[in-house]
């Protein structure tokens, strides 16, 4: 298999795993939360995503 193709597939697979983990974390956090707390939970998640992307 071509090394460049293998590297691209690894990158895509890593991105999918991280995205799936983020969805599970948000889902578990919102599962038992009251509706008044959901905005602050989603705001916190957005801050973490911005920090990981280097926007803050």
Image (cartoon, rainbow, N blue to C red):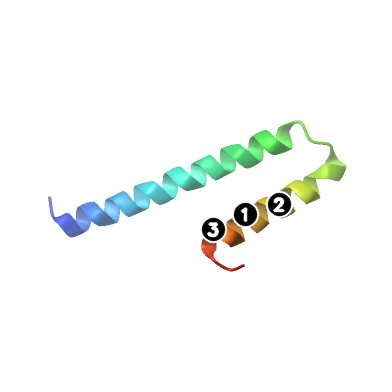
| Left or right for 14, reference 45 | left
Residue for badge 2: 44
Q: CA distance from mark 2 to mark 3?
A: 12 Å
Mark 1 and mark 3 in contact? Answer it, CB < 8 Å.
yes
Residue at (71, 52) in percent of width and height: 44
Residue for badge 3: 52
Q: CA distance from mark 2 to mark 1?
A: 6 Å
Specify few, some or many for label 3: CA neighbours under 10 Å numbering under 14, 14-19, or 20 or more: few
| Left or right for 55, reference 36 | left
Mark 2 and mark 3 in contact? Answer it, CB < 8 Å.
no
Residue for badge 1: 48
SS at badge 1: helix
Q: CA distance from mark 1 to mark 3?
A: 6 Å
Q: Quarter of the image for the C terminus: give it.
A: bottom right
Specify few, some or many for label 1: CA neighbours under 10 Å numbering under 14, 14-19, or 20 or more: few
Residue 32: image quadrant is top right
In the displayed image of the protein, which residue is found farthest to the bottom? 55
């Amino acid at each position: 298999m071509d090394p460049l193709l293998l590297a691209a597939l690894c990158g895509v697979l890593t991105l999918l795993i991280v995205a799936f983990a983020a969805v599970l974390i948000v889902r578990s956090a919102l599962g038992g939360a009251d509706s008044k707390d959901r905005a602050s939970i989603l705001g916190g998640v957005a801050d973490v995503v911005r920090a990981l992307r280097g926007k803050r």
